[in-house]
Amino acid sequence: MLEQTVVALRGKPGAVLTVLETLQKADPHNHLPRETLLAVARAMRLPLSQIYSVVSFYSFFNLKPQGEHTVTVCRGTACHTRGSRILLDTLRGTLDFVEMGEDEREHLVITTRDNRVTLRTVACFGQCAMAPVVDIDAVIYGQMNRQRVLTAVEKLAQQKGRHA
């Protein structure tokens, strides 16, 4: 798959992004393991440091395995003042996360032990009028509160597969 993608795109603007996106989507845990990054660097005849700079710049690339579902809480000023911290604390207290930590971009990225849910934070969704905002499997929900976020997580537990 890598060779076919690289051959089709080598030398074209944005080729590195497209190759990395394609490989991440093909990964069962929606991430880019180090071995994949090494293979991309070799195949595209680029230094590994250049591949890492692309992956670390764009927040949609994942260096850690991701859960079947993604819940992203906005940490922007409007969301923070309207209770996003309560939502984040509720999710962290309700779900069984493997580790508590932040990624290299200083955003929270943690996954449950059963790999069902990855909880992330972002600096701002740009949806301030709807604050606090939560993105669940690429669907934006506004004016969230503790009960609404708990209900949404319960619905995720009933769904099968990635973004079902």
Image (cartoon, rainbow, N blue to C red):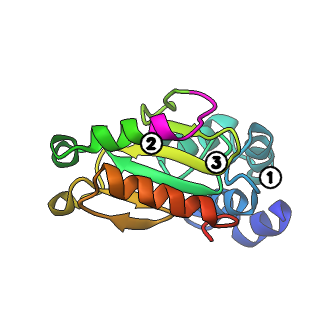
Sooner in the amino-acid sequence: mark 2 or mark 1: 1
Q: Secondary structure at mark 2?
A: helix
Task: Kindly identify which residue carries mark 2.
Answer: 91
Q: Nearer the viewer, mark 3 or mark 2?
A: 2
Magenta residues, start to end: 91-99
Q: Say few, some or many: other residues with alpha carbon within 10 Å of mark 3 (under 14 / 14 to 19 / 20 or more).
A: many
Q: Name the amino acid type tagged 1.
A: Ala
Circle 1 SS class: helix
Q: Amino acid at mark 2?
A: Leu
Lower sequence index among marks 1 and 3: 1
Numbered circle sitting on residue 66: 3
Residue at horizontal 83 percent and vertical 69 percent from the top? 4
Front label number (2 vs 1) = 2
Left or right of 56, for residue 25: right
Is 125 or 116 nearer to us in this picture? 116
Please tell me how crowded label 1 is: few (under 14), some (14-19), or many (20+) other residues with Cα within 10 Å: some
For image coordinates 24% across by 44% down, the residue present is: 76
> Label 3's element?
loop
Most foreground residue, 73 or 11: 73
- Characterize the local packing of mark 2: few (<14), some (14-19) or many (20 or more) Cα atoms within 10 angstroms: some
Quarter of the image with the N terminus is: bottom right
Pointer 1 residue: 43
Give how far across and how far down residue 30 sits, in percent.
67, 54
